[in-house]
Image (spheres, coloured by chain):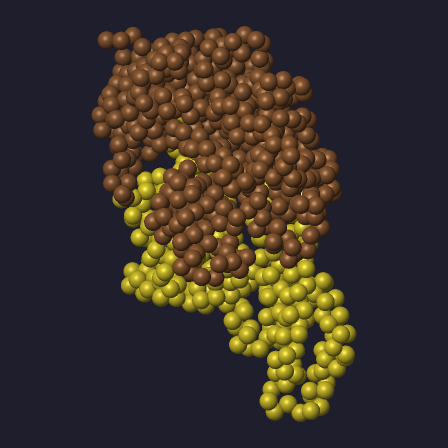
Chain colours: A yellow, B brown
Amino acid sequence: MTKLISQRVIASLLSLLGLLILVFFLSRLTGDPAVLFLPIDATEEMKTQFRALHGLDLPILEQFGRYVWDFVHLDFGESLRKARPAIDVVLEAYAWTLPLAGITMGLVVVAAIVLGSLAAFNVGGFFDRLVSIVSLIGASAPDFWIAIVAIVVFAINLSWLPTSGVGTPWHWVLPIAVLFIRPFGLIVQVVRGSMLTALSAQYVKTARAKGVKNLPIIFVHTLRNAMLPVITVIGDQAAAMLNGAVIVETIFGFPGIGKLMIDSILQRDFNVVLAAIMVTALAIFIMNILIDLAYGLLDPRIRN
Amino acid sequence: MSNALLEVRNLSVDFHTARGTVHAVKNVSWSVNRGETLAILGESGSGKSVSASAVMNILDMPPAHIVGGEIFYDGQDLLKVSYETHRALNGKKIAMIFQDPLSHLNPVYTVGWQIVEMMTAHGRPADMARARALELIKRVGIADAEAALHKYPHQFSGGQRQRLMIAMALMLKPDILIADEPTTALDVTIQADVLALLKELQAETGMGLVLITHDLGVVAEIADRVVVMSKGEIVEAGTPRDIYHNAQHPYTRQLIGAAPGKGTIKLLDADAPLLLETRKLCKTYGEFTALKDVSLSLHRGQSLAVVGESGSGKSTLARSILRLEAADSGEALWKGRNLLTMNARDLLGMRREIQMVFQDPTQSLNPRMSVYQLISEGWDIHRLMPDKAKRQARVAELLEQVGLAPEYAARYPHQFSGGQRQRIAIARALALEPELIICDEAVSALDVSIQAQVIALLDDLRARLGISFLFIAHDLGVVRDFADTVVVMKAGEIVERGPTAQIFDAPRHPYTQRLLAANLDPDPDMQAQRRLAGAPA
């Protein structure tokens, strides 16, 4: 298991390096940064000054070296719009996105596992059909539409919840609820399918022949076996959330990483965009390693 | 009114499938008393497991549907009691063990946890359960019981897993133990040990034992009474001796007649030219030695059997000869040319001359290809017989040769029974007119009656077409009927070789002796004699 994890860490570091190279050269391909950053009517003198200031007049490999060196020190330069280190701006946004993603995924996982398992156990029954229909709607409804409908209904018509912004716990309710729906719909279907397979396994027969009660058969004997494919999908969905729920954050004016990225791209605040990409990548790599650890924890056959 | 411990009366179970209703069992009645062993004997699809599953309430409903009958235990009809009442009896009063302990044990929990659960599920305290588990694990012959508690199922061998299953089943001292093909997945020597253990434990506890099996040898060894099932019905019942010597029903007679190991032994034609020879073949997988200096020779028209238990290297040998697996060192000479160093073009030619028939035709035949495509594919690969009309005629001929109707060419593998599928696999091998057919456990997955037919077919092909066979098997009865020469393998090495008659009548190596002693005789009297003669411990 240690071997597996260290292999994964090495592979992750290699892909991070790949991403680093890709981001650097792609950002250079989009044109002369001096032209992109400065106003259209900037003089040639200003451009030269700008290049000297940011080391853009150095040979490309040396620029790359500096870029890597800065990355290792988590130094992405200043945010052009906020006149603060870009990394600070990004981490601040993450401080909003992480709890949002964490709480939502926590609720999704618990709800999807319980409802999906029970649906699989009563396959073909009323509860199973209900869960299937609800999850199908959830997995297919576009989130911007749900967000807008939710605002109209709960914030405007009923005035139960604030429309946007942050500040009170009430501000979190709508973003979490809207973010919840799609991954819940998807994961509940995966749990149901995986549980159906696991429930037809021979060891379930053994458990029944032993006189084990239904609830432990579902949630102890079968669920742990059924979790492996589910974990893959959970990881996938969690990664999407770490990327920032761009649409939901924008609609609800939630100051997370998704909104920051969109704003920075629109404002051409490239240092912040770079910092956001690299920090997100790092977060996703860490999460993938956690998923691998979870595999090993659940299935002893993977450990050695 | 009967005083049987457990009695099944006129049980009928239907299976509702997409193709209509199948009567899985019809009016089946049997009973078992304290201290008695009842065997339910039948081939696959005979419904022999269905009534036992109904006793345990583990039938999948749907598709199963209990149409009628009663199951009496302790004065109550188990088909009428509540789910909760039935659950409380399961494991505690009536316990069950299964054919494949690996898939019947939960892979993600320790063996200790699963054994202990047998008692905690019925409300006993965990520390008491743990003490009892330790005691029983020791009793079933697992050396380090404490360590075994913390291991997972995949860390044990097949025989050990079945012992652990037995330990689990006996945790609450049940009145009845139902064993569904408990030794079918095990090697013969392990089978003998597990059957002996079951007998001992039965004598100690006085439990009633219901043993479901397809193997007459197992019946002869362990049963007090036997019921024979065919097509969902009990066709015969009695003591194993009565059944073996005085079978009334034609099906039972056919079953007994098909039991292998009773035919005349073949003699080797020593003058035939040499076809295949291996010299000091070696193969290791990491630490594990699969083949060690394996040298053998095979002549034209010969049928050479390679016998040995699982892990002895017999399949690796076949795969190495065909270069499906790369041997580490040694030579394999096909008509004097080394197969192991052959270039790709010559190898292709050689692959036409040596064909293979695998154990499980369900897996070795592509389910998306029709029988015609399966049989004719080899001609595409080797660019033979471009003419379509000729191909069709030849496929029809081949199907007839293996005893199938020519119209079957358009069908797909799933439309056939296991025995028919293996015939298709043989027809596929024959299509390329091979000189040698390697059969890797080619009849092991088949019912005895089908097995006898397939063996007869192979024998006929050998006599008529002069094809040689390298016949890999673990079933000594089949080997005795089919082979003229036997090679015994153990842990990657050949420990004994010789003409079939010599190996069976005067085995020299202790391992061969042990193997033969563990092989069960379908005749209860013969088996009793062998047991007394001090066979396996």
Decide if residue A29 is on the left or right side of residue A169: right
Residue drawn at (48%, 52%) of the image? A233
Position of residue B192 relative to residue A205, above or below, is above
Residue A240 placement (x, y as % from top left): 50, 60
Residue A122 placement (x, y as % from top left): 32, 40
Residue B329 placement (x, y as % from top left): 74, 43
Numbered marks: total: 0
Residue drawn at (70%, 65%) of the image? A71
Tell me which corner region of the image, top left, top right, bottom left or bottom right, holds residue B492: top right
Tell me which corner region of the image, top left, top right, bottom left or bottom right, holds residue A60: bottom right
State whether residue B242 appears in this view.
Answer: yes
Residue ranking furthest to the front: B271
Residue drawn at (63%, 17%) of the image? B506
Question: Image quadrant for the N terminus of chain A?
Answer: top right
Residue B482 placement (x, y as % from top left): 53, 30
Question: Image quadrant for the C terminus of chain A?
Answer: top right
Task: State the residue in front, A216 or B151.
Answer: B151
Position of residue A227 relative to residue B505, above or below, is below
Residue ranking furthest to the left: B68
Tell me which corner region of the image, top left, top right, bottom left or bottom right, holds residue B317: top right
Decide if residue B447 is on the left or right side of residue B336: left
Residue drawn at (46%, 33%) of the image? B456
State whether residue B83 appears in this view.
Answer: no
Task: State the residue in front, B77 or A52.
Answer: B77
Position of residue A211 relative to residue A140, above or below, is above
Task: State the residue in front, A51 or B404.
Answer: B404
Position of residue B491 relative to residue B406, above or below, is above
